[in-house]
Amino acid sequence: MREITFAQAVLEAQMEEMERDSNVFIIGEDVGKMGSAFGQCAGLYDRFGPDRVIDAPIAESGYANFAVGAAMAGKRPIVEMQFADFIVLAFDAVGNQAPKQRYMSGGELSVPMVVRAPQGAGFGAAAQHSQCIEAWFMNFPGLKIVIPSTPYDAKGLLKTAIRDDDPVLFIEHKALCGVKGQVPEEEYTIPLGKAKVVKEGADVTVIAVQSMMYKAVEAAFELEKEGISVEVIDPRSIIPLDKETIRDSVKKTGRVLITHEAPKRGGVGGEISAVISEEFFGFLKAPVKRVCAANVPLPFGMPEQYCLPSKDDIKKGVKEMLK
């Protein structure tokens, strides 16, 4: 297989789905000739024109709600938030409108809409451009949330999301846009709600969200040299959550550490921990542990690294669980 970047995988998924289905269109800020802030739409404007790659004004609420209406009318919009942080301005569309229309219409309406949101730290872009938002929308029934970590997963999951008849929040990590990985040229999709065991182990399970997956794998291989066997799971989607893969791993190791880049308080780690405690408590040998960001706004510039979870934090957490 050839190697392409995460951003190129997102681009390919959109291009292929736009060629496959004329109802698919993209709308967002600078998605046209600029090709998105991180290159995820590069060349699509020239290929499909302004009717299907729509440069919207700086009005997230307006163009997100426009997409909800278009989806209800039979289109399949892809809405890009230039930075995931800006999604707060489209909170009504993404949380209060799109996920509820099928239920409120008695199944008469569907909203086949994808909201792409590049999130996360790594660029020192400060508190309003560096947040991780996956937990913000977990409390809206009807909304699916996808969080890929690799180019292969990004392409396969995005194609599935675009074809889904319900709204999907597809979250990309900005710091992963340039990460390369093997992606086949032939057609493939990945089902939502299926986690991936990135590395097998026997002593501790580490469930690592998005960018933290890479730190978790690095920590696991270093711990292996000290005789500690760590299993790393990438959930790939938060809603639906693959409980079966998590259960099998918890049953094997009896210890679970959850790590994500968002702050610990109110984060997705708390929800996964609750699921494990409620449904798989009998397998646990120790309390579930979370390694997450500090509960502070991220500072501007490189000081942000002091607020984020690190590889060494994961190693420390794993060792504490084995005492």
Image (cartoon, rainbow, N blue to C red):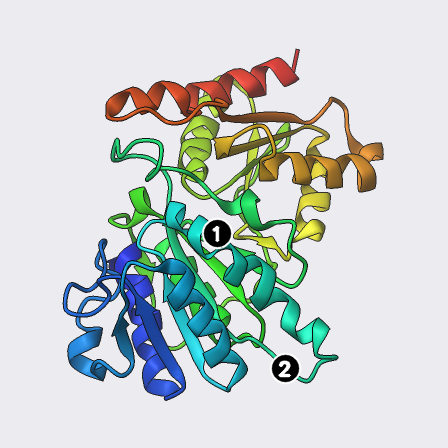
Quadrant where the C terminus is found in the figure? top right
| Quarter of the rendering containing residue 136 | top right
Quadrant location, the N terminus: bottom left
How far across and down, in percent of the image, does residue 216 sit?
Answer: 46, 32
The residue tagged 1 is 147
Q: Earlier in the sequence, mark 1 or mark 2?
A: 2
- Pointer 1 local density, CA inside 10 Å: few below 14, some 14–19, many at least 20: many
Mark 2: secondary structure? loop
- In the rendered structure, which amino acid carries the disc numbered 2? Leu
Residue type, mark 1 in image: Ile
Residue 10 in picture, x, y percent from top left: 33, 63
Up the image or down, 1 lies above or below 304; here it is below
Query: Mark 1 near mark 2, Cβ–Cβ under 8 Å?
Result: no
Any part of residue 165 in sight = yes
Q: Position of residue 292 (x, y in %)?
A: 51, 27
Taking the spot 50% from the left edge, 86% from the top edge, the residue there is 74
| Residue depicted at 55% across the width and 68% down the height | 167
- Picture quadrant where residue 287 is located: top right
Q: Residue at x 38, y 49 (%)?
A: 86
Disc number for residue 111: none
Q: Is residue 195 left or right of residue 211?
A: right
Q: Which residue is mark 2?
A: 109
Q: Residue furthest top?
A: 323
